[in-house]
Image (cartoon, rainbow, N blue to C red):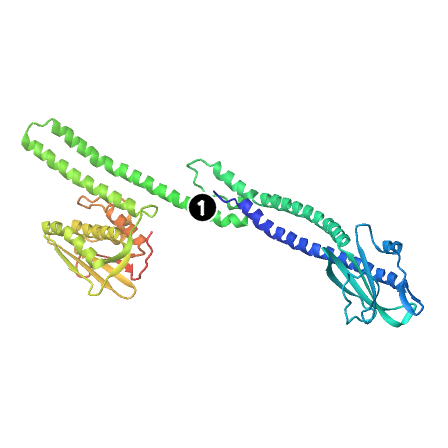
Amino acid sequence: MKASIKKQLVLWLAIPLGGLWLISTIVGYNAAFKFANDVYDSELVNSSDSVAARIKVKNGHIVVDLPPAAQAILRHNNTTRFFYQVLKSNGERIAGDSVLPAPTLDLKEGSPKFSTIKIGQSTVRLAEIKVLAPEADTEPIIIQVAETMRNRKELSIQIFMNIIIPQILMVILGASAVWMGVSRGLEPLDSVQKALAKRSRMDLSPVSEEIAPEEVIPLIVSINDLLYRLREDIKAQQRFVANASHQLRTPLAGLKTYSSVGLNINSLVEMKKVMIKIDNGLDRTTHLVNQLLALARNDPGSSTYFVIKAVDLNLAVSEVIADRISLATKKKIDLSFDACPYTAILNGDATSIKQLIGNLLDNALLYTQEEGKVAVSITSDSNKIILSIKDNGPGIPNAEREKIFERFYRIDGSTGIGSGLGLAIVREVARNHDAQIIIENNDNSNGTVIKIAFPNSENPRVN
């Protein structure tokens, strides 16, 4: 079940609110009980004064004149039981209820002492005070008065209810205010949701940050970043479709022409010539398709998943050269490889790096004349691993060195079956691996030196 932000906010705001209400309830109940206790304790002291006023001295003896009618006056209502006892300072009982306990011995004169005791099954509140009776001021006496707790509990409950009911109403109003406040605070999210819901499936423009509250702006930024990457991915697909439709139209038309011509040829010799042209056309078309796929794979907007791992550049170059030996032999080109004497390990996508090496080597072999030279070498230092491919071909004019990396661009007068995509692929692979492309003249003769300087680090950036 999906969690609701509104419910979670209300819950986490309601928990402390409920906790405060519970604490205030406990504090309020204790305060109400203490207040009721203090009130009735004061009444007990007044009752003890009333008992003291009824003490007389007759025939040299202390007596207490407290008839039932007077005791009834001391009760607060008919639901409360009242007890009293008058004793001499030595603990000898003069009058009263014998169910009361023995007096406390350390009583101070004029200072009442309160305690809660049990008499039978009833809990009573007891007050003890040592005083001098008005007519027996020669000897202090102890007066004990007690009453059951019912009145106290009823008063404390009444006070508590007067406190708790307004608090309950305040909690309800507070919870309602919290709910309304959270609902109002989340309204901007509805604006964002409605803005996104109104969009067509082709509308990938950024979401305006002005419609979102400050707390949601990081989410809007992330959504806009996702939309940007999606736009770039769609653009990459569109570029691939445009490139493929543009470049494949001509070779496919040529193949169709040759096949149509072949249908009307009866001579095996002429048919063989047509088949040779069809075979060459298929080679060019296959090469073009492979280049288009490689370019699409390394396009900055592509969503292709790269496998990033440690790549031994010495080994990768050796494998690529092994695949091109036949072409070098066919053109009698002296193809050499000077491997790095140290380890040349870089982190990257092995397939892309081999495509970069292969396209550079294909260009060098394709445009170098027969019996020419192509030298491949790898050097390294603490910062860079440099792949260098040197040839003694016709070279690249300085004015053309920036243009040759554009898609489908070929230098005027170029021969061969190149598609104009090889160096575009090299540029994208180098860019994806934070590598630098350097073009130099061959010092020893005509020709070109192309260097790819890879960062010599464990974690180069790869898209």
The residue to which callout 1 is attached is 224
Residue at the (22%, 58%) spot, across then down: 313
Task: Tell me how many marks there are.
Answer: 1
Any part of residue 64 in sight: yes
Q: Hey, which residue is sitting farthest right in the picture?
A: 59
Vertical placement of 250 versus 4: above or below?
A: above
Residue 406 place in picture, x, y as percent: 29, 47
Residue at the (16%, 41%) spot, across then down: 283
Q: Hey, which residue is sitting farthest front in the picture?
A: 59
Q: Amino acid at mark 1?
A: Asn
| 253 vs 298, nearest the viewer | 298
Residue at the (12%, 29%) spot, across then down: 262
Residue 375 place in picture, x, y as percent: 16, 58
Along the horizontal axis of the image, is 342 left or right of 241?
left
Along the horizontal axis of the image, is 78 left or right of 30?
right
Residue 377 place in picture, x, y as percent: 19, 60
| 123 vs 287, nearest the viewer | 123
Along the horizontal axis of the image, is 63 left or right of 403?
right
**Residue 408 falls in which quadrant of the image?**
top left
Along the horizontal axis of the image, is 430 left or right of 377?
right
Residue 393 place in picture, x, y as percent: 17, 53
Any part of residue 408 in sight: no
